[in-house]
Amino acid sequence: MIGPLFMHNAFGFEASLVVAFFIGIGFGFSLERAGFGSSRRLTDIFYGRDFAVMKVMFTAILVAMLGIFYLERFGLLVRQDIWILPTFLWPQILGGLIFGVGFVMGGWCPGTAFVGMVSGKVDAAVFLVGILIGSLGWGFVFDRVKGFYGSGSMGQITIYQWLGIKPELVAFLVVLLALGMFAGGNLIQRIVKNGGLKLRQPKMELAGELQ
Amino acid sequence: MSHVTQPKPYWSPYVAGVALGLTLLATYYFMGSGLGASGACSRIAASIAHAVAPATIEHNSYFAKYFHADQPVLKDWLVFEVLGVLVGGIIGALTANRFRPQVERGSHSSRNMRLVMALAGGIIVGFASRLAQGCTSGQALSGGATLALGSWAFMFSVFGGAYAAAYFVRKEWN
């Protein structure tokens, strides 16, 4: 059957909840295996100690992004039927900045906090309670920020539409960006670990550092 | 000697990224939309508040939409997905010997300081994810994979905000 299956009425709402549950299991398991049930591992990237967060996120984006293109190529998926999150530029930028502050302060994001909590991390459970409070707080100030919330509206726009270039070209640039970030991250990790830019290492030491 | 079972090593981040990416791809193939987490948290929060003060929540301009719908608040795709995340996480942790009750922190942070920061950070993240209409799972990861413009702007902003604030909370993690 040609995807997205749910958009093509392959199954109904109740069945989609079962799908959600099993996909969630895959999501939670992958996050846990990535080591994202640890707030220290999640925040290490912001101190240059460990770029796992960036490697996992960008690898996942590459796999899904390229996967969508290939499924479309093989006639298995109608890309136009995929929901593109609408762009509200100003609240998404400001929200992102604030989110980042909360992330490095609290050590979690919502998805990883669930995994952390079931790994026994009390700080993750407390973080989740915080999320609930913050969400409620939002609801109570919503009337005052409604205008800003809808500002910078650009509709369901993608990077390639915004730049007016082919989607495949943007995908290629994202691959390059990811590869560059992987290399850059490894370099920074090495600098932070060695306390300096020591490029000449005895061969024995390098072998031990291979990821 | 105590028989402590050593935690297994994490997967390579690239392997974990492939697993996560395939899960995300499957989500797009099955549903035509991506993963998420903060949306479920918003519904859970509204649901709890509703049990305490139903009229207030039902008339709240942001939460009203949850209660004037065909389905109960918690009968929602993201809520069921998050239930799965809990199960997947537990299975992962138990099979890797990584389940251990603790308050994880750097050596320069006290237990209580870490918990206070976790609460404060969570409040900020909860608020910000509503403002941005998503979080790192929904916007950055899922929206990012579809090359949505706002999702990428959010992603870079998250890294920007976190790196800017990192210096001020370094004792918590060091």
Image (spheres, coloured by chain):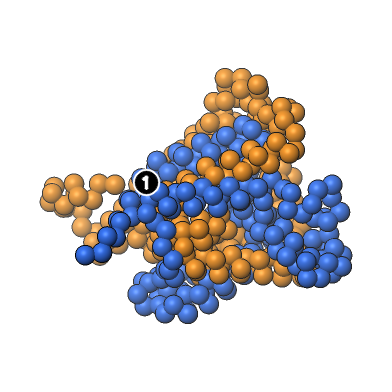
Chain colours: A orange, B blue
Q: Which of A119 and B5 is in front in this view?
A: B5
Image height of A170 relative to B107, above or below: above
Question: Can the viewer see residue B147 in this picture?
Answer: no
According to the image, label 1 marks what residue? B11
Residue B24 place in picture, x, y as percent: 56, 39
**Quarter-of-image position of residue B154:** bottom right
Question: Hey, what amino acid is under mark 1?
Answer: Trp
At x 42%, y 58%, the residue is: B99
Q: In this view, does A195 lie to the left or right of B57?
A: left
Q: In this view, does A29 lie to the left or right of A192?
A: right
Figure quadrant of the N terminus of chain B: bottom left
Image height of B98 relative to B27, above or below: below
Residue B130 place in picture, x, y as percent: 69, 60
Q: Is mark 1 on a helix, strand or loop?
A: loop
Q: Nearer the viewer, residue B89 or B4?
A: B4
Residue B156 place in picture, x, y as percent: 54, 54
At x 77%, y 54%, the residue is: B73
Image height of B15 relative to B61, above or below: above
Q: Which of B128 and A97 is in front in this view?
A: B128
At x 75%, y 28%, the residue is: A9
